[in-house]
Each structure stands twice: as C-alpha cells, then as structure tokens.
Image: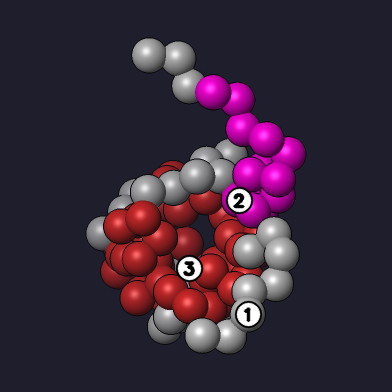
C-alpha cells in the first residue's frame, strides 16, 4: 500500500500541531512529556518538528492529556480555517 503524499495544507496543520505542543511543553523536557504520554522522545520530536505531521488520534490525545490541553484546544489551534464555537 502506497501512502498518498500530504497536501501543503496537511503539512501546515502538522506544523501548527508541533508549535502548539512545543509551546505547551514550556520548560518541561521532551523526555519527561513523552514518558508521561507513553511515547518515545523521538516520536514527540518528530511531531514537534513536523516530520510526523499526521500522528494518530490516540497519540495526540495522550500528548494533550500530558500537557493539560483539551482536544478542543488542539483542534482549534490546528484548524486550517477558524472553527465556530459549538
């Protein structure tokens, strides 16, 4: 199975996610946050740098929990167009 190349918009969304996670991590180390989320530091590094722009839902969910972010905050920050409040 061949993976379809990502669109520029999908790459931008991945970069937004990375910026959000780096910002929310603050002074905490990458190793500390990754361990809290049950991930490797390398996985977190790839997400934060945009090299893994489409992480799995449960990966994002675990990171959000470890960083004290709601999934609504993550979705809003990563949306390509502003989301209307529900």
What x and y, as percent, mark residue 74?
A: 52, 71
Q: Are marks 3 and 1 in contact (CB under 8 Å)?
A: no
Q: For mark 1, does the 10 Å Cα neighbourhood hold few (<14), some (14 to 19), or many (20 or more) residues?
A: few
* Circle nearer the viewer, 3 or 1: 1
In this view of the protein, can residue 22 be seen by the observer? no
Percent x, y of residue 32: 38, 68
Image coordinates of residue 4 in percent, x first then y, are 54, 23
Of discs 1 and 2, which sits in the foreground? 1
Q: Is residue 6 magenta?
A: yes
Q: Nearer the viewer, residue 79 or 11?
A: 79
Q: Is residue 13 magenta?
A: yes
Helix, strand or loop status at disc 3 = loop
Q: CA distance from mark 1 to mark 2?
A: 21 Å
Q: Residues within 10 Å of mark 2 (few under 14, many from 20)?
A: many
Query: Which residue corresponds to the image point at 53% horizontal and 69% vertical from the top-left?
Result: 75
Q: Residue 37's image quarter?
A: bottom left
The location of residue 41, given as percent across then percent down, is 41, 52
Q: Is 26 placed left or right of 72 in the picture?
A: right
Q: Secondary structure at mark 2?
A: helix
Tell me which residue sits at (38%, 14%) in the image.
1
For the residues marked 3 and 1, what is the alpha-carbon distance in whole angstroms? 33 Å
Residue occupying the point 36% across, 74% down? 66
Question: Which range of residues does the magenta coloring cover?
Answer: 4-15
Location of mark 2 (residue):
14
Q: Vertical placement of 26 versus 35: above or below?
A: below
Residue at the farthest left position: 38
> Label 1 belongs to which residue?
84
The residue that disc 3 covers is: 29
Task: Kindly report the secondary structure that dominates the magenta region of the rendered protein.
Answer: helix
């Amino acid at each position: 199975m061949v993976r379809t190349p990502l669109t520029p918009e999908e790459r931008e969304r991945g970069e937004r996610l990375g910026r959000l996670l780096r910002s929310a991590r603050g002074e905490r180390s990458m190793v500390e946050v990754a361990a809290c989320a049950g991930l490797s530091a390398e996985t977190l590094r790839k997400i934060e740098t945009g090299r893994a722009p489409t992480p799995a839902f449960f990966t994002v969910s675990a990171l959000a929990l470890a960083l004290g972010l709601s999934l609504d905050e993550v979705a809003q920050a990563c949306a390509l167009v502003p989301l209307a409040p529900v």
